[in-house]
Image (spheres, rainbow, N blue to C red):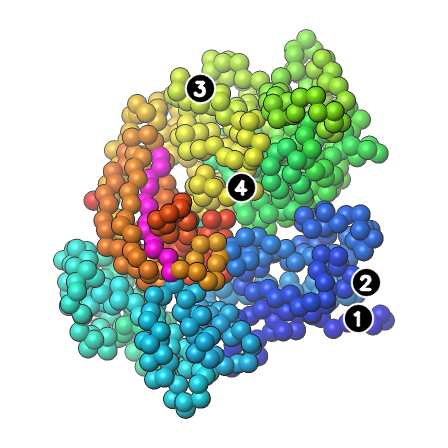
Amino acid sequence: MLNTPPSPFADARVRSPLPPLPTLRVRSLVGSPMKGANSTRVDLTSVTRVTKGQSTIPFVKNANNALVKGKESLSFSVVYEDYRGVETTLDIVCDNQEQFDSWFSELTGLVKYHMQNKASDDRVRRFAQRQWSLADADADGLLSFKEILALVQKLNIDLDRGYVQKIFDEIDADNSGNLDYIEFQALLDELSKREDVYAVWYALCTGAIFTGHRSVNSYMSSSKPIPSSYKSMALPAETFHRFLTEVQKVEQTLEQTKLKIEAMKGEDEERDTKLRFSNFRDYLSSGENAAYAVECSTATYQDMEQPLSHYWCASSHNTYCESDQLKGYSSVNRYINDLTKGCRCVELDCWDGPKNEPIIFHGHTLTGQIKFKDVITAVKEYAFLQSEYPIILSFENHCSIPQQKVMASYCKSILGKMLVVPELAEGGRLPSPEALKNKVIIKAKKLPKKADEEEPIDEDLEEQKKAAESTKPKDDGEASPPGPAKEKKKKPKVAKELHDITFLSGVHFKSWFQSANEALANEMSSFSEPKTEKFIKSSAAEWVEYNKKQMSRIYPAGVRIDSSNYNPVPSWNVGSQIVALNYQTSCLQMHLNDGKYLDNGGCGYVLKPAVLRSPGVSFDPVAGPFPREEQLDFDIEVMSAHQLPKPNGAQKGEVIDPYVKVELYGIPADQRNCMTRVIDNNGFNPIFNETFTFRAKMKSLGLLYIAVYDSDQFDADDFIGYATIPLTCLKEGIRKVDLRSWNGNNSGEFQFCSLLVNITFK
């Protein structure tokens, strides 16, 4: 037996009765060119996945390094979100198979354990653990006053040094000049007073909360302090039940409310059905009280037995690109990332590669190249970890006939029974997502139906070529970028082997009349961003009809070589299913996309409203008609924020001056944006108390976008965090809005930061 070194992940096991933040400490990464022998520390709660092989950018960059080359079976990557909320990797090459098996097995088990417990774990305890671990700079198990001051600064609390010293001295009972973990928790409790929550509690204790949310607002805005005696009150279950049913609009019995109260009790609390302030505070900050309905975000609840054309489908554009569309890296990891986040349609730009191996890259550019085979292997391994609903592989096929045959062979041999070419359902309709569970279907050009029929024009390729030419310097004397040496004027052929495994046939769009009267349901067209804008203006109602039977794919304009994104909302409004975005680019458009597809359990398919799928029902996003049941008028009061981080993960710097933007995206008539005032020098518990009114004609097309910024007098305001909530998933009552980082992540400091809002439907 090989002498395998001990696992470097031993420190990740929590044994202390006063546990610090669960972390992974890697003291030596054997043979890894990406990391040295220095200790690397990763918060296990921030790990999103552990992947085998060499799919990440550090591995791609070091592909020819002797320590990496040929060792794919001994390699794995830990993918995690760093302190800025940015996805980062820890890449490891092991010495031998036994070492790999030991390390990979133990680490994946630890990550799985922490991911399962993260949602159910005590949020307050996790926050205390994290701050203790970060504040204890010298790792001596004690915090000095200097370390506490640094923590206060990091937490965005504007407190006088003398006041912090006073609290520190009061809690430091043995006058040691240091705080242990229990004393630290007491200090954190003192600093974390929630005056906003206490105002709601006071309104509940006095019964004022049942007379309208304005009464809560007045308590929070009042300069007169609320009597502290109410904090020790214990309310009967009946009062909490009334709050849940009348204010929060929760449907449940009194007996269920009593069971809920009992479940909220801590180990040292009296086991009764009385509600205390700590219980109420924990309820308001819990996942159960999210403004984004838990039943929408955690379960696939929609009817999944309708045709594929009746669903919006989470889709990425040029999935292989890590950055820009001209000379950026390409990686298999991009496919893994998008698939594990629920994306159901990924794109593969396929070209002839050396040694009869098809490759994927952005043609006529200098982007990196990856093997087609490696992407198909990744699809097999990662396609259904997040969702069991079908994957659509969108092929942009530029390969020769021989390499198309290789493509078809890889698809069949690697995907096996996952790959299907289903029959059209009754009435010539597309099959349903339910019927295609755990299956992969291919969208590509097929052989012409008739011998004399022309093959479809590749408009996407033409845009790529134009964009590449527009950015290429004239007479620079440099060699041409990789790709086909010359474009043949004759249209490319399609191999029968590839034709036979293709279900969704990519066809050139001719007219709305031809599509309605002649096209099959599995024939679909792709529309560029400029053409999409033109058709939405000129023939939105016709496009809605088209999308009831067939699927349409929207892709960014070729000039977006920076991988920026277009606004997907207008395309969703006409029912386009595959609205492909550059997932690698964090932006407002991706924020909207992420919030939209968190719905329906994050399965990647969201059922369109009846007006976008019912035959015989005409609809135009501008002209309507708008069904009465789609109307939603509501108020949203931005009450307060809690534990906002500094911009870009900064640990030091000025205390932020936050404000909140609230915007509604949807049909043109519904769009509106509002903004709170700026709160100076308070990112820890700022109180806003501002109410905005919205009127939506089409709630099923509405997305509520809430973003927090740090006001800057002399420069552009800094982005702090955001949340996107479909109006169909918005909950009434006094609710918590969890914020995500610019990159869409919710780990690190974003495990804890949130807004408290009051939502009232009219």
Residue 512 screen position, x and y as percent: 47, 15
The quarter of the picture where the N terminus appears is bottom right
Other residues around mark 2 within 10 Å, as few (<14) / some (14–19) / many (≥20): some
Amino acid type at circle 2 is Asn
Q: Nearer the viewer, residue 533 or 29?
A: 29
Contact? badges 1 and 4 (CB < 8 Å): no
Q: Mark 4 points at which residue?
A: 585
Q: Name the residue under label 2.
A: 96
Q: What element carries label 4?
A: loop
**Range covered by the magenta-colored residues:** 655-666
Query: Which residue is most to the top?
Result: 452
Amino acid type at circle 1 is Thr
The image quarter in which residue 200 lies: bottom left
Placement of 58 over or under 436, stated as above or below: below
Other residues around mark 3 within 10 Å, as few (<14) / some (14–19) / many (≥20): few
Q: Can residue 477 be seen in this view?
A: yes
Q: Does the magenta stretch include residue 664?
A: yes
Amino acid type at circle 4 is Thr
Placement of 724 over or under 696, stated as above or below: below
Q: Name the residue under label 1.
A: 4
Q: Given this view, does label 2 or label 4 mark the residue nearer the observer? A: 4
Q: Which mark is residue 534?
A: 3
Q: Is mark 1 on a helix, strand or loop?
A: loop
Labels 1 and 2: the sequence-earlier one = 1
Labels 3 and 1: the sequence-earlier one = 1
Placement of 6 over or under 373, stated as above or below: below
Residue appearing at x 65%, y 47% in the figure: 333
Contact? badges 3 and 2 (CB < 8 Å): no
Contact? badges 2 and 4 (CB < 8 Å): no
Contact? badges 1 and 2 (CB < 8 Å): yes
Residue 309 screen position, x and y as percent: 49, 30
